[in-house]
Amino acid sequence: MKDEPYKKINEQYSIAADGSLYYIEPIIKDGEVTGQTETSIANHAPILKELRLTDNGIECLEELVFCVRRNNQNSEDVVLTGKDIHSQTPHLKFGAACRLYNDKKYISKYREAMQIQCEEAVCSILYQHTGYAVIEGQRVFLNGKNSVTAEGLTDKYNVIFDSQLSNYCFTSGRHESRFDVLLKLLPLIAPQKLICTGLGLSFLTPLNALLRDIGIEPRFILYFTGKTGTQKTTMAKLFLNFFGSFDNGTSSPASFVDTSNSVEKKFALTDSTLVLLDDRIPSTTPKIRAQMEAMEQVVARQIGDRTGRARMNADGFLRPSYRPKCNLIITAEESFSNVGESAIARSISVEIKPGDVKLKELTAVQKRASELNECMGDYIQYIIQNWEVLQTKLKPLFEELRDKAQNGGHGRLAECVAHLQIGISIMCDWLISIDEINEKRAEELKASAWSVFMELSEEQNRRIAEEKPVKLFLDAIQEMRDRKAIKFIKISEDNTTAYNGFSDKIAGFYDGDFYYCYPDGIYTEVRKFYAAQDKTFPLSKNALFKQLATDNLIEIDTGGQNTKAKRINGKRSRLLWLRAIALDTDEDNEQ
């Protein structure tokens, strides 16, 4: 503000050099203005610096950026909303030292002085999300520093992220060697399965919005697993460089110590962008175990279902939902603990062993990581230029690849393979269009990637089989029976037991064809078995028995009940008739 006696807001309000806010009122006599009175109403003056709309991709919020003139100085910026201005004490937003000389009398005038400044202010737009937006008829991929249009990079749009997302950006530089880094140096760092899955997910990710529009959005998580020191986080961050600037000293966009609310919001703000959820550590204490497992389960649902939690305002209206729009890499020493079969099917896992990552080659690419970022900027420009063509092409391609990937395993994994292959396929189309590879090389890249993805899918199917509740149930009974933690009493042909020495370890009876289990007792023992291993059995008793019936592992009664009556030693009880073939691996079933 200039050093002058007053700065006028309008004819009624002005600001003194020391910051006092004055209300000016004309003196009227006989219908004519003969002078004016100037009344100081505050020891400070709010000065509007900027009126802006903040767009985070889910909702637009009006923000008013004020500073305060007091004691001949301007304060730091303070961001207010319209609701703040209309409160009973708007001046307190600027600090306790800012006061009105008579609150009740001058509060309405103080508010008016603020609103008058808003009337003539030019409104700017601040974007707080990545991803595609149509602005003034032009499709734009928003990101920090530079955004991408069909014509190339632009810094026209004001995109600012908070805290852990601040490293997302596109660099304006362009090196002729960037394609060598992508195609020649990057594959030298680690085994093919790690590089292929990282590239597949990275180049799939900018297609998320387009795939969402046609109903085939990716719904899986990529895990990098391995013991500490295997460079899993370093490799994940290397792939994040396609979308920003991430090195070993850069904090990850999200971690397992974050709250579920903050992670949910980050996943929503990073539209069509790759995110890392870092450091799923082993369960050292019950508290840490619960924290890790809860986050893993929440994230699996968020990405796997692509839904955000519904929330309600105090007035009863629903608030906008933060729906996850990113693709995700999780790094973990220990993964898939207490998350269940469904969550495992929402994932593809790559194990990194000691020595897999070549440190010399890794360092060489890390020094040129910005060239990966340059490649992604070019690739997104290609997507925008070919948006309509891709809209037509991608769904048939996805369906073809999904059908080809069906191998009798979980259906979700076929979709994972199809999506990863789409990332590689469209990457190859882009490279062909700029004459960086030919058709033959593209087919070689796609064939090798397909082989890798199918192998990983089969490995994940084996993990799913290990976590099936029915298998967990049977495995627990077998182990407890074999180490005599529970007993089954053999019954003879006339339905009499071999002895009457019952104890707490008796789980039921057997006759060579069935194990007749006490329903509540056997379920309780199985839950205890897994609780001792810090695991939670994933199904309720009724749901488990229903699944056993579906798999034809128990005999049901004529009424459709999963337990059936059996008379033993003259006593009739309803028992779980578990087929012996489900538990027995040899002819010796003596307990």
Image (tube, helix red, strand yellow):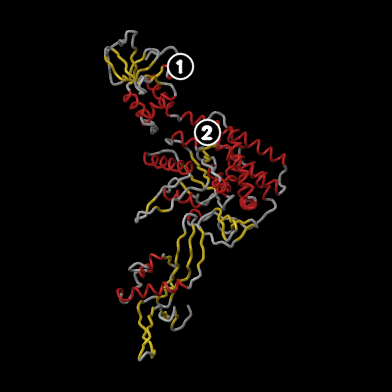
How far from the left and from the top, in percent, is residue 422?
61, 41
Quarter of the figure that contains the C terminus: top left
Up-down relation of residue 114 to residue 367 (above or below): below
Up-down relation of residue 487 to residue 394 (above or below): above
How far from the left and from the top, in percent, is residue 474?
41, 23
Q: Amino acid at mark 2?
A: Gly
Mark 2, mark 1: which one is toward the viewer?
A: 2
Mark 2, other Cα within 10 Å: few <14 / some 14–19 / many ≥20: some
539 and 253: which is toward the camera: 539
6 and 214: which is toward the camera: 214
Q: Amino acid at mark 1?
A: Thr
**Which image quadrant for residue 556?**
top left
Determine whether label 2 and label 1 are within 8 Å by CB: no
SS of the residue at dot 1?
loop
**Which image quadrant for residue 287?**
top left
Query: Number of labelled discs?
Result: 2
Residue occupying image coordinates x 38% and y 33%: 536
How far from the left and from the top, in percent, is residue 481?
38, 20
Up-down relation of residue 390 to residue 466 (above or below): below
Q: CA distance from mark 2 to mark 1?
A: 30 Å
The circle drawn on residue 411 is 2
SS of the residue at dot 2?
helix
Mark 1, other Cα within 10 Å: few <14 / some 14–19 / many ≥20: few
How far from the left and from the top, in percent, is residue 336?
46, 36
The circle drawn on residue 585 is 1
Residue occupying image coordinates x 72% and y 41%: 439
The circle drawn on residue 204 is none
Query: Left or right of 427: which side holds 52?
Result: left
- Which circle's residue, 2 or 1, is located before the other in the chain? 2
